[in-house]
Amino acid sequence: MNGVLVLEDGLFFRGQRFGGATQGAGEVVFNTSLTGYQEILTDPSYAGQMVTLTYPHIGNYGVNPDDVESEAIQVAGLIVRDHHPVPSNWRSERSLGTWLARSDAPGLCGVDTRALVLHIRERGALRGVLRDLPDADALPIAGAVSEVEGDLRATLDTYVTEARAVPSMAGRDLASVVTCATPWTLGSDDARWHVVVLDLGMKRNIARQLVQVGCRVTVVPATTTADAIRALAPDGLMLSNGPGDPEPVTAAAATIAALLGELPIFGICLGHQLMAIACGAKTYKLPFGHRGSNHPVRDLMSSRVEITAQNHGFAVDAGSIPGTGLAITHLHLNDDTIAGLRHRTHPAFSVQFHPEASPGPHDSHHLFMRFVDELERFARTRDV
């Protein structure tokens, strides 16, 4: 089946449909990772977005149940250059197309993804719709809707209107949509530390990494109050990653503000932004975000450069940091945006990247041990 991606600014990209029959709609973004499409598709941070993968060959190693980062496919659509329908990997249990079809998640292949990504870099992330279009063979591989004639023009004009009606990522509390419905636990009851994770759209590997460094984990919904967290008697609080705009996630920000200084806090991505907001800082939307597993970050305390996995469309405003009690600890080397913060007086720190990776490099795994060190230091202070 032929298909088409139509953007809100009137540009279209022709391709072939695969996966689910659902008609996709969302903000169109791109990810530069070379591998890890299964983890990307199940990352709740992509709620409300259609993902374009810049690496051209997708699907060649299939999918398996061990590499998912949540219970379901989270993206609104997948856009690729070359879809490989027959995987070749000993861990594969089914093909990417079969998995998408079973989840009714839409895909579009044969797209000129290089042109699409360049357009997004120039114009910023754009809303779009992914639609069936049986007569798409009559179209060029990409072009402007305004240059199409006849009945196809009328159809594409309708799709442009639909793209412009897609809700913006700004101003929406998506964390409350993707968070867990009820608390759940992971790890041994005999673990040295008990950490509560505020699930803002958590990737499972965050919980797994905490368990590996000696923690018992209790994952709670994003709307959990400070009193409810206190009742669990945790040694520390983890603020997870999650989708969209941090400013509307007011309940979580209030919880963080109430617990700041009461126990060690470690924030990742959306959790990093919400910790900043809880301290009085502001955030803003990036033109096209940071998404991929090859983003260079400098640790200002050690001058060490780490290659990190990132997935976010918003960032903390450096101009809003003075007076918050926060200090900048990491910078993104591509655009000098804030990539890490610490509180000057409280045991709290955060990063605007994914130390748990999955997919991505392991350069920043040490941050989980840093969190454990904070738990140890805080426990000694509390016992004095």
Image (tube, grey):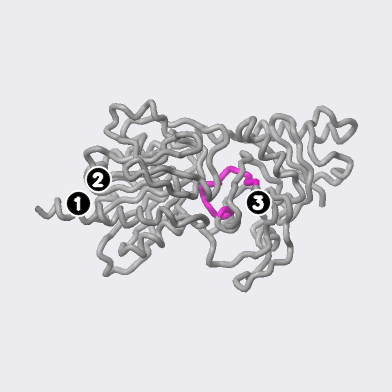
What residue would you read off at disc 1?
378
What residue would you read off at disc 2?
347
Q: Nearer the viewer, mark 3 or mark 2?
A: 3
Amino acid type at circle 2 is Pro
Q: Which quadrant of the figure has residue 156?
A: top right
Q: Which residues are magenta?
A: 40-53
Q: Is 303 on the left-hand or right-hand side of 138?
A: left
Residue 101 in percent (x, y) is at 69, 59
Residue 177 in percent (x, y) is at 50, 46
Question: SS class of the residue under badge 3?
Answer: loop
- State how far apart marks 3 and 1 are (Cα): 44 Å
Q: Residue 257, relative to residue 79: is it above or below?
A: above
Label 2 vs 1, first from the N-terminus: 2
Residue 298 in percent (x, y) is at 41, 42
Q: What residue appears at the point 59 percent right and 46 percent down from the top-left corner?
A: 31
Q: What residue appears at the point 79 percent right and 43 percent down from the top-left corner?
A: 14
- State how far apart marks 2 and 1 are (Cα): 8 Å
Task: Using a 10 Å C-alpha cutoff, classify the residue at mark 3 as few (fewer than 14 neighbours), some (14 to 19) or many (20 or more).
Answer: some
Task: Please give the label number shown on residue 222.
Answer: none
What residue would you read off at disc 3?
55
Label 3 vs 2, first from the N-terminus: 3
Task: Using a 10 Å C-alpha cutoff, classify the residue at mark 2 as few (fewer than 14 neighbours), some (14 to 19) or many (20 or more).
Answer: many
Q: Is 95 on the left-hand or right-hand side of 375?
A: right
